[in-house]
Image (cartoon, helix red, strand yellow):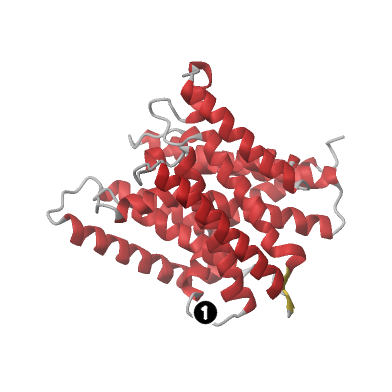
Amino acid sequence: MNRKSTTTRLSSVDILRGLAVLFMVEAHIAIIIPFFSDLAVTFAAPAFLLVAGLSFQLFLRNRESRGSSTRDIFREVFWRAMTLFFLTSLITWTANLVGWGGSVFSNIFFIISTGFLVGFLLRRSFRGQILAVILILVLDLVIRAYQVQALAFLAGDVQGLQVSILPYLCFFFFGQIASKAYKQDNFNRYDNQVLLFYGLLFFMLNLAVYLAFPYPLVGELRGYTPLLLMVASLLLLLALVLVRVVELDGGLRRWLRPLENLGRISFTSYYLTYISFLVLGSFQFSSAVAVNLLLFMGTSLGLVVLERLWRPYYRYGLEWAYRKISATALAYTRNRWP
Protein backbone atom coordinates (compact mmCIF):
# COMPACT_ATOMS: atom_id res chain seq x y z
CA MET A 1 0.00 0.00 0.00
CA ASN A 2 1.45 3.31 -1.08
CA ARG A 3 0.11 6.70 -0.24
CA LYS A 4 1.59 9.82 -1.68
CA SER A 5 1.57 12.94 0.43
CA THR A 6 -0.60 15.59 -1.15
CA THR A 7 0.03 18.37 1.35
CA THR A 8 2.93 20.74 1.62
CA ARG A 9 3.38 19.81 5.29
CA LEU A 10 3.70 16.34 6.73
CA SER A 11 1.55 15.73 9.80
CA SER A 12 4.01 13.37 11.49
CA VAL A 13 6.82 15.94 11.25
CA ASP A 14 4.68 18.67 12.79
CA ILE A 15 3.56 16.28 15.54
CA LEU A 16 7.18 15.48 16.36
CA ARG A 17 7.92 19.21 16.38
CA GLY A 18 4.95 19.81 18.68
CA LEU A 19 6.25 17.13 21.04
CA ALA A 20 9.59 18.95 21.10
CA VAL A 21 7.71 22.10 22.14
CA LEU A 22 6.19 20.23 25.11
CA PHE A 23 9.63 18.99 26.15
CA MET A 24 10.86 22.57 25.87
CA VAL A 25 8.01 23.90 28.03
CA GLU A 26 8.87 21.56 30.90
CA ALA A 27 12.63 22.06 30.42
CA HIS A 28 12.28 25.83 30.92
CA ILE A 29 10.28 25.62 34.14
CA ALA A 30 12.65 26.65 36.92
CA ILE A 31 10.79 24.57 39.53
CA ILE A 32 12.18 21.05 39.25
CA ILE A 33 10.37 17.72 39.58
CA PRO A 34 12.90 14.87 39.88
CA PHE A 35 13.11 12.67 36.77
CA PHE A 36 10.17 14.38 35.01
CA SER A 37 12.08 17.65 34.60
CA ASP A 38 15.37 15.86 33.92
CA LEU A 39 13.73 13.79 31.19
CA ALA A 40 12.36 16.92 29.52
CA VAL A 41 15.71 18.74 29.71
CA THR A 42 17.47 15.71 28.24
CA PHE A 43 15.10 15.39 25.26
CA ALA A 44 14.03 18.99 24.53
CA ALA A 45 16.99 20.30 22.51
CA PRO A 46 17.76 16.95 20.80
CA ALA A 47 14.13 16.68 19.65
CA PHE A 48 14.22 20.20 18.19
CA LEU A 49 17.51 19.51 16.44
CA LEU A 50 16.49 16.13 15.05
CA VAL A 51 13.22 17.44 13.61
CA ALA A 52 15.13 20.43 12.18
CA GLY A 53 17.50 18.07 10.35
CA LEU A 54 14.56 15.98 9.15
CA SER A 55 12.66 19.04 7.87
CA PHE A 56 15.80 20.42 6.25
CA GLN A 57 16.43 17.24 4.27
CA LEU A 58 12.80 17.20 3.11
CA PHE A 59 13.14 20.86 2.10
CA LEU A 60 16.23 20.04 0.01
CA ARG A 61 14.42 17.13 -1.61
CA ASN A 62 11.50 19.40 -2.44
CA ARG A 63 13.73 21.99 -4.10
CA GLU A 64 15.55 19.34 -6.13
CA SER A 65 12.24 17.86 -7.29
CA ARG A 66 11.31 21.32 -8.60
CA GLY A 67 14.42 21.33 -10.75
CA SER A 68 16.27 24.02 -8.79
CA SER A 69 19.98 24.22 -9.48
CA THR A 70 22.56 23.49 -6.80
CA ARG A 71 23.57 27.16 -6.81
CA ASP A 72 19.99 28.34 -6.27
CA ILE A 73 19.42 25.83 -3.48
CA PHE A 74 22.63 26.89 -1.75
CA ARG A 75 21.61 30.54 -1.92
CA GLU A 76 18.30 29.76 -0.26
CA VAL A 77 19.98 27.57 2.37
CA PHE A 78 22.57 30.28 3.07
CA TRP A 79 19.97 33.00 3.63
CA ARG A 80 17.80 30.73 5.74
CA ALA A 81 20.81 30.01 7.96
CA MET A 82 21.79 33.69 8.17
CA THR A 83 18.21 34.77 8.91
CA LEU A 84 17.83 32.21 11.68
CA PHE A 85 21.13 33.32 13.19
CA PHE A 86 20.11 36.99 12.90
CA LEU A 87 16.73 36.48 14.60
CA THR A 88 18.31 34.38 17.34
CA SER A 89 21.01 37.00 17.92
CA LEU A 90 18.48 39.83 17.97
CA ILE A 91 16.29 38.11 20.57
CA THR A 92 19.28 37.06 22.69
CA TRP A 93 20.88 40.51 22.68
CA THR A 94 17.53 42.11 23.52
CA ALA A 95 17.18 39.74 26.48
CA ASN A 96 20.69 40.68 27.59
CA LEU A 97 19.66 44.33 27.75
CA VAL A 98 17.22 43.51 30.56
CA GLY A 99 19.72 41.31 32.38
CA TRP A 100 18.49 37.86 31.39
CA GLY A 101 21.88 36.83 30.07
CA GLY A 102 22.67 34.08 27.62
CA SER A 103 24.91 33.63 24.61
CA VAL A 104 23.72 33.28 21.04
CA PHE A 105 26.28 30.50 20.62
CA SER A 106 24.59 28.48 23.39
CA ASN A 107 21.25 28.58 21.59
CA ILE A 108 19.95 25.57 19.69
CA PHE A 109 18.93 27.77 16.77
CA PHE A 110 22.61 28.65 16.27
CA ILE A 111 23.27 24.90 16.00
CA ILE A 112 20.41 24.57 13.51
CA SER A 113 21.73 27.41 11.34
CA THR A 114 25.15 25.73 11.38
CA GLY A 115 23.51 22.42 10.52
CA PHE A 116 21.90 24.03 7.46
CA LEU A 117 25.29 24.92 5.99
CA VAL A 118 27.06 21.67 6.88
CA GLY A 119 24.03 19.52 6.08
CA PHE A 120 23.82 21.03 2.60
CA LEU A 121 27.21 19.50 1.78
CA LEU A 122 25.95 16.05 2.87
CA ARG A 123 22.47 16.31 1.39
CA ARG A 124 22.91 13.51 -1.16
CA SER A 125 25.15 11.18 0.84
CA PHE A 126 23.44 8.89 3.34
CA ARG A 127 26.80 7.29 4.12
CA GLY A 128 28.34 10.75 4.46
CA GLN A 129 25.74 11.68 7.07
CA ILE A 130 26.49 8.54 9.06
CA LEU A 131 30.25 9.12 8.69
CA ALA A 132 29.80 12.72 9.86
CA VAL A 133 28.09 11.48 13.03
CA ILE A 134 30.93 9.03 13.71
CA LEU A 135 33.68 11.60 13.07
CA ILE A 136 31.98 14.22 15.25
CA LEU A 137 31.61 11.77 18.13
CA VAL A 138 35.26 10.71 17.82
CA LEU A 139 36.45 14.34 17.73
CA ASP A 140 34.25 15.18 20.72
CA LEU A 141 35.70 12.28 22.69
CA VAL A 142 39.26 13.35 21.81
CA ILE A 143 38.59 16.94 22.91
CA ARG A 144 37.12 15.78 26.22
CA ALA A 145 39.66 13.03 26.91
CA TYR A 146 42.75 15.12 26.14
CA GLN A 147 41.24 18.41 27.38
CA VAL A 148 42.07 20.34 24.21
CA GLN A 149 41.38 23.83 25.54
CA ALA A 150 41.51 25.54 22.16
CA LEU A 151 38.59 23.37 20.99
CA ALA A 152 36.77 23.02 24.31
CA PHE A 153 33.95 25.29 23.14
CA LEU A 154 33.01 22.70 20.51
CA ALA A 155 32.40 20.11 23.22
CA GLY A 156 30.54 22.56 25.46
CA ASP A 157 33.29 22.48 28.10
CA VAL A 158 33.31 26.24 28.52
CA GLN A 159 31.62 28.02 31.37
CA GLY A 160 28.52 29.86 30.17
CA LEU A 161 28.14 27.71 27.06
CA GLN A 162 25.03 25.61 27.65
CA VAL A 163 25.16 23.39 24.59
CA SER A 164 27.71 21.00 23.13
CA ILE A 165 28.13 22.14 19.54
CA LEU A 166 29.64 18.97 18.09
CA PRO A 167 27.31 16.44 19.76
CA TYR A 168 24.30 18.62 19.02
CA LEU A 169 25.17 18.66 15.33
CA CYS A 170 24.87 14.88 15.53
CA PHE A 171 21.19 15.20 16.39
CA PHE A 172 20.73 17.38 13.30
CA PHE A 173 22.43 14.75 11.13
CA PHE A 174 20.33 12.03 12.74
CA GLY A 175 17.33 14.04 11.56
CA GLN A 176 18.66 14.01 8.01
CA ILE A 177 19.12 10.25 8.31
CA ALA A 178 15.53 9.89 9.57
CA SER A 179 14.30 11.44 6.32
CA LYS A 180 14.81 8.00 4.73
CA ALA A 181 11.42 7.18 6.27
CA TYR A 182 9.92 9.71 3.85
CA LYS A 183 11.49 8.33 0.70
CA GLN A 184 10.23 10.34 -2.25
CA ASP A 185 7.23 11.38 -0.10
CA ASN A 186 5.73 7.92 -0.65
CA PHE A 187 4.73 5.99 2.46
CA ASN A 188 5.12 2.29 1.87
CA ARG A 189 3.99 -0.11 4.62
CA TYR A 190 6.65 -2.75 3.88
CA ASP A 191 9.49 -0.21 3.79
CA ASN A 192 8.21 1.28 7.04
CA GLN A 193 8.17 -2.16 8.68
CA VAL A 194 11.78 -2.75 7.62
CA LEU A 195 12.84 0.67 8.90
CA LEU A 196 10.93 0.10 12.14
CA PHE A 197 12.77 -3.18 12.66
CA TYR A 198 16.18 -1.58 12.17
CA GLY A 199 15.14 1.46 14.19
CA LEU A 200 14.09 -0.75 17.10
CA LEU A 201 17.30 -2.79 16.80
CA PHE A 202 19.38 0.41 16.78
CA PHE A 203 17.57 1.67 19.87
CA MET A 204 17.96 -1.63 21.76
CA LEU A 205 21.70 -1.72 21.01
CA ASN A 206 22.18 1.85 22.18
CA LEU A 207 20.02 1.26 25.24
CA ALA A 208 22.23 -1.73 26.14
CA VAL A 209 25.35 0.43 25.77
CA TYR A 210 23.76 3.17 27.88
CA LEU A 211 22.84 0.71 30.62
CA ALA A 212 26.39 -0.64 30.55
CA PHE A 213 27.84 2.89 30.80
CA PRO A 214 25.02 4.82 32.48
CA TYR A 215 24.86 8.59 32.75
CA PRO A 216 22.23 10.47 34.77
CA LEU A 217 19.35 11.92 32.74
CA VAL A 218 20.45 15.53 33.10
CA GLY A 219 20.86 18.15 30.42
CA GLU A 220 24.54 18.73 31.12
CA LEU A 221 25.36 15.15 30.08
CA ARG A 222 23.15 14.83 26.99
CA GLY A 223 26.21 15.46 24.80
CA TYR A 224 28.07 12.40 26.11
CA THR A 225 28.17 9.55 23.64
CA PRO A 226 26.20 6.74 25.39
CA LEU A 227 23.36 9.08 26.40
CA LEU A 228 23.46 10.91 23.07
CA LEU A 229 23.09 7.72 21.05
CA MET A 230 20.31 6.41 23.30
CA VAL A 231 18.36 9.68 23.00
CA ALA A 232 18.93 9.95 19.24
CA SER A 233 17.95 6.33 18.57
CA LEU A 234 14.76 6.72 20.63
CA LEU A 235 13.79 9.88 18.73
CA LEU A 236 14.52 8.11 15.41
CA LEU A 237 12.29 5.24 16.47
CA LEU A 238 9.57 7.70 17.47
CA ALA A 239 9.76 9.37 14.05
CA LEU A 240 9.32 5.97 12.35
CA VAL A 241 6.37 5.10 14.59
CA LEU A 242 4.70 8.41 13.75
CA VAL A 243 5.07 7.68 10.03
CA ARG A 244 3.25 4.40 10.64
CA VAL A 245 0.41 5.61 12.87
CA VAL A 246 -0.11 9.02 11.23
CA GLU A 247 0.92 8.88 7.56
CA LEU A 248 0.09 5.22 6.87
CA ASP A 249 -2.68 4.22 9.28
CA GLY A 250 -4.03 7.67 10.06
CA GLY A 251 -6.02 6.44 13.04
CA LEU A 252 -4.36 8.70 15.61
CA ARG A 253 -4.12 11.81 13.47
CA ARG A 254 -7.30 13.34 14.84
CA TRP A 255 -6.18 12.82 18.42
CA LEU A 256 -2.74 14.24 17.72
CA ARG A 257 -4.06 17.29 15.85
CA PRO A 258 -3.32 19.73 18.74
CA LEU A 259 0.34 18.61 18.72
CA GLU A 260 0.46 18.95 14.94
CA ASN A 261 -0.92 22.49 15.08
CA LEU A 262 1.45 23.40 17.90
CA GLY A 263 4.34 22.21 15.76
CA ARG A 264 3.44 24.83 13.17
CA ILE A 265 4.43 27.66 15.55
CA SER A 266 7.36 25.95 17.31
CA PHE A 267 9.77 28.87 16.75
CA THR A 268 7.34 31.40 18.22
CA SER A 269 6.34 29.00 21.02
CA TYR A 270 9.95 28.48 22.02
CA TYR A 271 10.74 32.13 22.62
CA LEU A 272 7.30 33.06 23.96
CA THR A 273 7.56 30.35 26.60
CA TYR A 274 11.21 31.07 27.36
CA ILE A 275 10.60 34.77 27.98
CA SER A 276 7.44 34.07 30.01
CA PHE A 277 9.28 31.68 32.31
CA LEU A 278 12.14 34.14 32.75
CA VAL A 279 9.60 36.61 34.10
CA LEU A 280 7.92 33.98 36.30
CA GLY A 281 11.31 32.93 37.62
CA SER A 282 11.45 36.07 39.73
CA PHE A 283 8.52 34.85 41.85
CA GLN A 284 8.73 32.43 44.78
CA PHE A 285 6.42 29.42 44.99
CA SER A 286 5.75 27.10 47.89
CA SER A 287 4.75 23.73 46.40
CA ALA A 288 7.26 22.72 43.72
CA VAL A 289 5.44 19.71 42.26
CA ALA A 290 2.00 21.34 42.12
CA VAL A 291 3.31 24.57 40.60
CA ASN A 292 5.45 22.72 38.04
CA LEU A 293 2.54 20.63 36.83
CA LEU A 294 0.24 23.66 36.83
CA LEU A 295 2.73 25.69 34.78
CA PHE A 296 3.32 22.81 32.37
CA MET A 297 -0.34 22.03 31.75
CA GLY A 298 -1.38 25.68 31.73
CA THR A 299 1.38 26.72 29.32
CA SER A 300 0.83 23.75 27.00
CA LEU A 301 -2.91 24.38 26.86
CA GLY A 302 -2.28 28.10 26.44
CA LEU A 303 -0.02 27.49 23.43
CA VAL A 304 -2.62 25.23 21.82
CA VAL A 305 -5.31 27.88 22.32
CA LEU A 306 -2.91 30.58 21.06
CA GLU A 307 -2.28 28.62 17.87
CA ARG A 308 -6.01 28.23 17.35
CA LEU A 309 -6.69 31.95 17.80
CA TRP A 310 -3.56 33.03 15.94
CA ARG A 311 -4.08 30.81 12.90
CA PRO A 312 -5.37 33.63 10.64
CA TYR A 313 -2.45 35.83 11.74
CA TYR A 314 0.56 33.53 11.30
CA ARG A 315 2.26 36.27 9.33
CA TYR A 316 2.93 38.12 12.57
CA GLY A 317 4.94 35.29 14.14
CA LEU A 318 8.62 34.43 14.08
CA GLU A 319 7.97 31.74 11.46
CA TRP A 320 6.64 34.39 9.07
CA ALA A 321 9.53 36.77 9.87
CA TYR A 322 12.01 33.95 9.23
CA ARG A 323 10.53 33.13 5.82
CA LYS A 324 9.97 36.76 4.83
CA ILE A 325 13.48 37.98 5.68
CA SER A 326 15.22 35.02 4.02
CA ALA A 327 13.02 35.30 0.92
CA THR A 328 13.69 39.04 0.65
CA ALA A 329 17.45 38.57 1.00
CA LEU A 330 17.36 35.77 -1.58
CA ALA A 331 15.43 37.89 -4.06
CA TYR A 332 17.78 40.87 -3.57
CA THR A 333 20.93 38.83 -4.17
CA ARG A 334 19.59 36.51 -6.88
CA ASN A 335 20.95 38.60 -9.76
CA ARG A 336 23.88 40.04 -7.83
CA TRP A 337 25.68 36.83 -6.93
CA PRO A 338 27.88 35.21 -9.55
Residue 195: quarter of image? bottom right
Which residue matches tag 1? 252
The residue lying toward the viewer, choosing from 295 and 204, is 204
- Name the image quarter holding the C terminus: top right
Image point (77%, 42%), residue name: 75
| Position of 179 relative to 8 (above/below) | above
Q: Position of residue 276 (x, y in %)?
A: 34, 52
- Name the image quarter holding the N terminus: bottom right
Image point (67%, 47%), residue name: 326
Is residue 184 found left or right of 87 in the rendered image? Answer: right
Q: Residues within 10 Å of mark 1 (few under 14, many from 20)?
A: few
Q: Position of residue 200 (x, y in %)?
A: 55, 61
Is residue 136 found left or right of 78 in the rendered image? Answer: left
Q: Position of residue 279 (x, y in %)?
A: 29, 48
- Identify residue type, mark 1: Leu
> Is residue 269 among the parts visible in the rendering?
yes
| Position of 32 relative to 297 (above/below) | above
Image point (55%, 71%), residue name: 312
| Position of 109 relative to 187 (above/below) | above
